[in-house]
Amino acid sequence: MRMRRTVAALGAGAAVLTVMAVAGPAQAAPIEGSEVNCSTTGGYGSGSWIWSSKTKITSVALKGKDTKADGYHPAIRLVTVTSAGNVRYWSWHHVYGGKDATETWNTSAEDSNGIKRASIEVGIFNGSSKVDSLGCGSAGPLNPQF
């Protein structure tokens, strides 16, 4: 009786190893990402994300805040760099509502050319025109999956 249980246990263990060998290694789990922030005259922005793969970041949270009652408003956007070094500027997200107004946007980003680095840019706008002299940026660390 004891011999049969041992043989059965060995058989089950071999079956598990066979399945693992056929299925191959599991996909790498998402890596907790980065948090960055910057401030400029009239605005503050922060961003956070999770590195999901070489080509995708998920749980992207962009937050912008207007810090000055000056008639201008801040906007924030994601900026990514591909594995080849090409920069991609994603769309601006504007904070309207005056001083102390805060907005948060939740999104994701994917680029088939890879995302080697992600960062944020905060700009100050007069209507739809960016005030070039005002703004800031903050780069996150390199994607650990490269």
Image (cartoon, grey):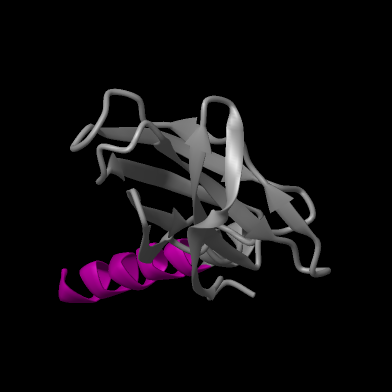
Residue 40 falls in image quadrant: bottom left
Q: Nearer the viewer, residue 81 or 38?
A: 38
Residue 116 at x, y percent in the picture: 65, 68
Q: Is residue 3 magenta?
A: yes
Q: Residue at x 38, y 44 (%)?
A: 62
Main secondary structure along the magenta-highlighted residues = helix
Q: Residue at x 34, y 49 (%)?
A: 43
Q: Nearer the viewer, residue 99 or 119?
A: 99
Residue 46 falls in image quadrant: bottom left
Residue 122 at x, y percent in the picture: 47, 51
> Which quarter of the rendering shows the C terminus?
bottom right
26 displayed left or right of 82: left
- Per the rendered image, the range of residues in magenta is 1-17
Q: Residue at x 26, y 68 (%)?
A: 4
Residue 36 at x, y percent in the picture: 37, 65
Residue 27 falls in image quadrant: bottom right
Residue 8 at x, y percent in the picture: 31, 65
- Image: 119 above or below 91: below
- Image: 131 above or below 20: above
**Can you see residue 139?**
yes
**Can you see residue 27?**
no
102 displayed left or right of 26: left
22 displayed left or right of 15: right
